Image (cartoon, helix red, strand yellow):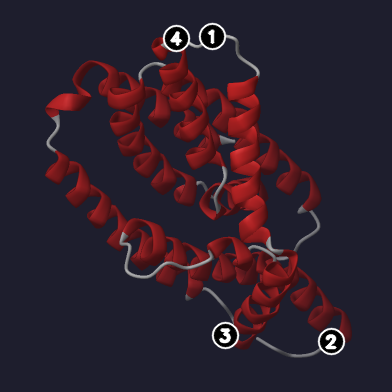
Amino acid sequence: MIGTLINFAAILAGGLIGLFAGNRIPLKVRQTLTSALGLFTLAYGVHIFSQTQNMLVPLSSIVLGTIAGEALKIEELLNSLGERIQQRVEHGTNADSPVAQRFITGFVTASLLFCIGPMAILGSIQDGLVGDYQMLAIKSILDGITAIAFASTFGVGVLLSAAMVLVYQGAISLLAGALGKGFDQSVILEMTSVGGVILAGIAISNLLEIKKIRIGSFLPALLIVVLVVLLLNTLGIAWS
């Protein structure tokens, strides 16, 4: 939960800066910071991928996971979920004033951006499994900078999105901690290595904008790698 609390605080801090001083930060500075964080995120993804004991394990998991993700249309489901939430929130209010709509847009848009994404899921799982909140700390910096930009545009509604992050990511971390108590070190290492590939994809696709990648389709690999390692361990196959 430590990573989620850091993320919560970063969004609040960024939102407050955005409310009172966001327009004073030049656009070029914000863009350059995002690029710098993208490069760091890419390097960090490569670093944690290197923890694998056998590259064939994350490779096979990514391949099978991507096939499953595309078959299940996870990328479309995530996008559809975001659109549905936005429609329901906007439909559920009778306040049609520009101020109210600005608040709603800020809250919904920021909540979706901060919550619906592989980095939120992966970082929360890693935090819950082994107490490693480095990935969520990186996400916190990214979210804090984004909150500055959003709050300067949409106002105080962005601050409320921090509560959504607290509930959403906190629940994932607690669930991962409860389910993962029986995992040995080999499972955690290979799951982390798959996470490194996904993290590198996020950097290339979303932060550096080098090439658009359907990252959502990779998410089943996080489950498949667990099954692969447990199967190999059960069969007594030496794979590391």
Q: Residue 3 at what x, y percent from top left?
A: 51, 39
Cβ atoms at labels 4 and 2 below 8 Å apart: no
Please state, as top left, top right, bottom left or bottom right, where the N terminus lies in the image.
top right
Q: Estimate how packed mark 2 is, as few (under 14), some (14 to 19) or many (20 or more) residues with alpha carbons within 10 Å.
A: few
Q: Which residue is mark 3?
A: 55
Q: Compared to 175, does 153 lie above or below?
A: above
In the picture, measured across the screen, residue 117 lies left or right of residue 128, that is: left
In the picture, measured across the screen, residue 178 lies left or right of residue 55, that is: right
Q: Estimate how packed mark 3 is, as few (under 14), some (14 to 19) or many (20 or more) residues with alpha carbons within 10 Å.
A: some
Q: Estimate how packed mark 1 is, as few (under 14), some (14 to 19) or many (20 or more) residues with alpha carbons within 10 Å.
A: few
Secondary structure type for disc 1: loop
Disc 1 vs disc 3: which is toward the camera? 1
Disc 3 vs disc 2: which is toward the camera? 3
**Distance between mark 3 and mark 2 Cα atoms:** 18 Å
Checking the image for residue 95, the label placed there is 1
**Distance between mark 4 and mark 2 Cα atoms:** 65 Å
**Distance between mark 1 and mark 4 Cα atoms:** 6 Å
> How many marks on residues?
4
Residue type at mark 3: give it: Met
**Distance between mark 3 and mark 4 Cα atoms:** 56 Å
Task: Identify the residue at horizontal 37%, vertical 70% (top origin).
Answer: 211
**Distance between mark 2 and mark 1 Cα atoms:** 63 Å
Please state, as top left, top right, bottom left or bottom right, where the C terminus lies in the image.
bottom right
Of the image marks 4 and 2, the number of the one nearer the N terminus: 4
Of the image marks 2 and 1, the number of the one nearer the N terminus: 1
Q: Which residue reaches farthest bottom? A: 238
Of the image marks 1 and 3, the number of the one nearer the N terminus: 3
Q: Compared to 160, does 86 lie above or below?
A: below
Q: Which residue is mark 2?
A: 236
Q: Which residue is mark 4?
A: 97
